[in-house]
């Protein structure tokens, strides 16, 4: 028996198309950055058309390079499904009293059907993938036209226009085109094609086997989150001949693209023998159909919750697409200005990614739904290429750096709100050569009577937690838990210093703020 969970697991192991998508996105992005956006429209159009031809050839070559991997992946999934189906059914058939030798042999006709299905599914997947050569050209053209229009209009700088073009391309992603003209993402198209091919093939073989053994009743599989129109018949018994008291093949939409074993349907069936135990109790089927989950105090039907989760997963995948494109763009940026803009964008997206991942984690924790990280992945991990390795590490690092930057900005803001007057707060105290500092003893001790030595003051400076710059950079004030020192940088003079016993409320509160953030 092929269960819905088995199909989901096997589809998650498809990785070749993800690696292909990485290569295409990087290739298109690289050419967007390298294109010369001259204001002469004729010259621009000529270069664009030339690059389009190169992109088409590049993608066709990439698809060809992945063909053998695609064939191997699809063949493996069919083989796994064959083992799953026949091992389960063989046990049922033997328990029903059939001879072992009669059961264990797969007929030559069945083998031919499996081989033909493998070939058909592989061909369809490869042909769909080849259409990315055309959509990649469109992706490049639309992104370049956007940049060119923005530059020519004068509304955007060259740097802004290139960045906007790269972001636009990453959001569109790599798509395939069906003969009908329908457009789908590469991931969805390949997954749908393989899932449908495997499921329909072994469903057909189950039907054939039932005919050979003169079995009329089939039991349908079931799963949580089924489409409402499928949930009414999942897990039920079906009569192939239309016996009364059972569902018919028409009742379940067998042969209809929207029905049982239609496009993207994970339901299958297996032979049911009179007197054998049902795979699901009615209570289990009712629970699958009527289950609700709670999110932020709101009750949501299970199916709607799954769709919401899928939407959140797609959002995460989109951001990862963008991170890969931005990463490739900054590698190929020729100006420091463009590279700086792209670095900022990469940092912002990294924070956005972490926020969305945390939201999804909270959603699955509250609802009890299983986190499907395969759907969030953009590129395969095992190859050492793509988002799974280098870009992921960069995004995590950028997110941490951005969070640290935000934390530092908040701390600086709070310190200033305590009443520290200055032009700039330095959480890493400004470094100075203390050996060259003079000590204004006349002012510090005789006039102000702070009773502080030069050695103590040097210690205050060395152990300061933060410093404050003033007087257009000419003065630096050092604040530490043991004391404070004011230094005139222009003449290397310690103007004043005093110990913690003389701290006023402004200094005490400022140091408390600093200490509060240290504990976080």
Image (spheres, grey):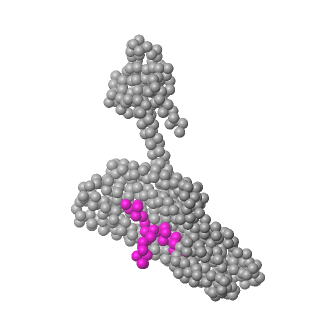
Counting every numbered tag in the picture gives 0
In the foreground, 508 or 305: 305
Q: Residue at x 45, y 20 (%)?
A: 498
Q: Is residue 297 above or below residue 402?
A: below
- For residue 188: magenta? yes
**Is residue 235 or residue 56 the one in the foreground?**
235
Q: Is residue 12 magenta?
A: no
Q: Is residue 60 above or below residue 204?
A: above
Instruction: Pick whichever, 502 or 154, lies toward us.
Output: 502
| Magenta stretch bounds | 168-196
Q: In this rendering, would 181 be left or right of 36?
A: right
Question: Taking 501 as reference, is 100 above or below it?
Answer: below
Q: Is residue 108 visible?
A: no
Left or right placement of residue 311 versus residue 42 in this view: right
From the viewer's perspective, is 305 left or right of 88? left
* Residue at (46% x, 68% y) in the render: 186
Give the x, y percent position of residue 214.
69, 87
* Residue at left offset 57%, top offset 77%: 261
Residue at the farthest top position:
446
Task: Name the quadrant of the N terminus.
Answer: bottom right
Q: Extreme front residue here?
A: 298
Residue 65: percent from the left, percent from the top?
A: 47, 69
Tell me if residue 515 can be seen: yes
In the rendered image, residue 438, in percent from the top left (x then y), is placed at 39, 19
Residue 74 locus on image (x, y percent): 55, 73
At horizontal 53% and vertical 73% (from top left) the residue drawn is 264
Quadrant position of residue 13: bottom right
């Amino acid at each position: 028996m092929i269960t819905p969970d088995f199909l989901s697991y096997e589809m998650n192991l498809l990785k070749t198309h993800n690696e292909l998508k990485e290569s295409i996105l990087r290739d298109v992005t690289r050419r967007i950055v390298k294109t010369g956006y001259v204001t002469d429209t004729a010259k621009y159009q000529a270069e664009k058309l030339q690059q389009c031809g190169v992109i088409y050839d590049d993608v066709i070559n990439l698809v060809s390079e992945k063909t053998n991997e695609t064939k191997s992946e699809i063949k493996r999934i069919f083989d796994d499904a064959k083992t799953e189906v026949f091992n389960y059914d063989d046990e049922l058939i033997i328990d029903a009293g059939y001879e072992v030798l009669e059961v264990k042999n797969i007929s030559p006709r069945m083998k031919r059907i499996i081989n033909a299905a493998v070939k058909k599914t592989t061909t369809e997947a490869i042909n769909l993938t080849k259409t990315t050569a055309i959509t990649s050209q469109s992706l490049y053209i639309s992104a370049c036209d956007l940049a060119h229009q923005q530059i020519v209009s004068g509304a955007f700088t060259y740097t802004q226009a290139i960045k906007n073009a790269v972001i636009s391309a990453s959001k569109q992603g790599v798509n395939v085109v069906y003969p009908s003209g329908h457009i789908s993402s590469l991931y969805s198209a390949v997954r749908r094609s393989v899932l449908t091919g495997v499921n329909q093939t072994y469903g057909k073989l189950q039907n054939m086997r039932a005919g050979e053994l003169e079995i009329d009743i089939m039991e349908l599989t079931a799963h949580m989150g089924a489409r409402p129109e499928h949930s009414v018949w999942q897990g039920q018994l079906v009569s192939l001949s239309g016996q009364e008291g059972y569902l018919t093949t028409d009742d379940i939409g067998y042969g209809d693209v929207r029905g049982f074993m239609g496009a993207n349907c994970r339901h299958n069936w297996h032979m049911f023998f009179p007197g054998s135990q049902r795979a699901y109790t009615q209570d289990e089927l009712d629970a699958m159909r009527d289950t609700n989950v709670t999110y932020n105090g709101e009750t949501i039907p299970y199916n709607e919750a799954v769709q919401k989760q899928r939407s959140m997963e797609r959002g995460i995948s989109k951001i990862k697409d963008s991170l890969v494109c931005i990463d490739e763009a900054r590698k190929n940026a020729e100006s420091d200005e463009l590279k700086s803009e792209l670095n900022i964008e990469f940092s912002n997206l990294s924070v956005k990614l972490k926020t969305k991942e945390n939201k999804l984690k909270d959603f699955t924790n509250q609802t009890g739904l299983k986190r499907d990280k395969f759907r969030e992945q953009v590129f395969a991990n095992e190859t050492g290429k793509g988002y799974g390795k280098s870009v992921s590490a960069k995004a995590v690092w950028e997110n941490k750096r951005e969070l640290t930057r935000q934390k530092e900005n908040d701390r600086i803001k709070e310190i200033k709100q305590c009443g520290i007057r200055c032009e700039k707060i330095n959480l890493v105290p400004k470094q100075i050569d203390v050996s060259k500092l003079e000590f204004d003893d006349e002012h510090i001790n005789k006039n102000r009577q702070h009773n502080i030595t030069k050695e103590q003051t040097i210690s205050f400076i060395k152990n300061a937690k933060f410093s404050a710059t003033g007087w257009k950079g000419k003065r630096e004030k050092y604040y530490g838990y043991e004391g404070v020192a004011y230094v005139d940088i222009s003449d290397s003079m310690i103007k004043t210093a005093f110990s913690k016993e003389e701290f006023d409320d402004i200094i005490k509160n400022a140091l408390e703020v600093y200490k509060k953030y240290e504990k976080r």
